[in-house]
Image (cartoon, grey):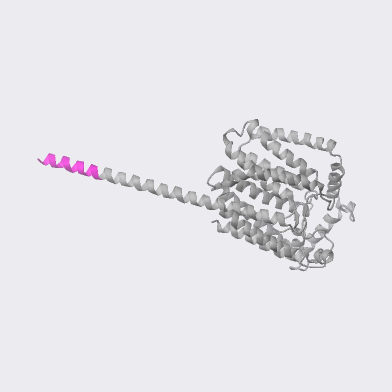
Amino acid sequence: MDLPFLVLVLTLVGFGLVMLGSASGAVALYRRGDAFAYLRPQLLYAAMGIAGLWLASRVDYHIYHKLAWPLLALSLVLLTAVLFMPEYNGCKRWLVLPGVGTLQPSEIAKFAVVLVFSHIISLNHDRMRSFAVGVLPFVLVLGVVAILMLLEPHLSGTVLILSIGAVLMFVGGTGLRWFMLAGAGGAAAIGTAIVLMPELVPYAADRLNSWLDPFADPLGDGHQTIQSLYAIGSGGAAGLGLGNSRQKHLFVPEPQNDFIFSILCEELGFLGACAVILLFSALLWRGITLAAHAPDRFGALLVVGFVVQVALQAVLNIAVVTNTIPNTGISLPFFSSGGTSLILLLAEMGVMVNIGRNGERVAQQREQMRAQREAARAEREAELARKTIDLASARAARTEQ
C-alpha cells in the first residue's frame, strides 16, 4: 500500500472538515438555527467515504471494465432527471431524495467518464490515432454529457469534464491533429449553443462582466467576488486565527461551499493557503507516481483521470475565489460541503490505492522472476565453469601420460 498517498488523502479530509466547521458555523446558525448543520452531515459523509475508500481498495479495479458503460448510462439518466428538479441559485444541479438528502449527478458523471474513457483506450490503444476509435466515441460521450450539464446550467462542471476527457485522450494516444480540429469544433459548438439555448447568453455574460469589473455591481453579481477578495486580503501572512474570520458572518456567500478557500485564507493567511496548495500538489505527484507504476494501461489511465480531476477542480476553485477566472461555481475537493462529491472522491482514492497495491504486487513478481533468472544464469555459468575445469584436467592428464 502507498502509505504516503493514503496519509495525504486523510490529511486533506481532516483539514477540510476542520475548515468546514470553522467556515460554516455562522451561515448554518443563520439559515438553520444550528451551527453544526453543515459539519454534522459532512462528518457522516466522510465516514461513509472512508468506508468506500476501504471497500474500493479491496476490489480488483479490473471490474470497472464491466461497470463503465452501465455507470455512464445511470449518470445520463440522473443528469436528465435533475432538469426537472426545482432551481437553487438559478441552477438545477441537485436531485432531492426525500428522507435522504440531495444527490449531485454531475459528480457521478465525472466518475463514469473516467471509467469509460479508460476502458475504451485500454482496449484500443493501438488504434487511437484513427478518427473512428481515437476521437468519435469520446466526442459522442462528452457531447451528450456536456449538453445535459449546460442545461442545468453547470459551466464549471462542463469545463472540468471536458478537460478530464481531453487529458485522457492525449495520454491515451489520440493524434494532436484531432485536438486542433476539436478547437475549431468547440468554437462552432459554442456558437450553436448560443443559437439553440439563448438563455445561456445572459448567464454567461453576467459572469464575465462581474469577473472583469466586480466593483461595477458591488451589491449584485460582483458581491461574492468582492467579499471573497476582502477575506483573502484580510488574512495577511499568518491569518486572523482559526475560527476568527469576519467575512464568514454572512458577508461571503456560500462560505461553506464554493468560497471556503477565501475563509481559509482569512483565518490561516498566506501560509495556510500555501499549505493547501502544497497538499494538492503532493497528491498530484503521488498520483503520477502511481500511474507510472500501474500494472497495466487501464490502471494507469484510471489514476490519471482521478488525480487530474482533483487537481483541475482545485485549480479552478482557487482561480474563481481569487477572481483569476470568472465565477462559475465549483467546489474545492475535500473541503467544500457536499456528500456526493466527498464520498465519490474518497471512493476514487480507494480505486487508486487498489491500483497501487496491484502495481506493488506485479513489481514484486517481476523482481522475483528477475532474481530467479539471475540465479538460473549463475547456475548455468557455474556448471559451464565446472565442465571447463574438468575438460582442462582431462587434457592435462592425457598430456602427462
Q: Position of residue 106 (x, y in %)?
A: 73, 48
What segment is highlighted magenta in the picture?
386-401
Image height of 237 relative to 134, above or below: below
Horizontally, residue 388 falls left or right of residue 88, namely left
Quadrant of residue 146 within the rendered picture: top right
Q: Could one spot residue 102 in this view of the protein? A: yes
> 312 or 153: which is nearer to us?
153
Q: Where does the image place residue 320, in percent across and percent down from the top left?
A: 77, 52
Quadrant hosting residue 353: bottom right
Residue 237 visible within the image: no
Residue 205 percent across, percent down from the top left: 86, 44
Q: Tell me if residue 388 is in the magenta stretch.
A: yes
Quarter location, residue 127: top right
Q: Measured from the top left, where is residue 185 in percent x and y?
A: 75, 34
Q: Residue furthest left?
A: 401
Can you say which quadrant of the picture contains the N terminus? bottom right
Residue at (70, 34) in percent of width and height: 180
Magenta part, dominant SS:
helix
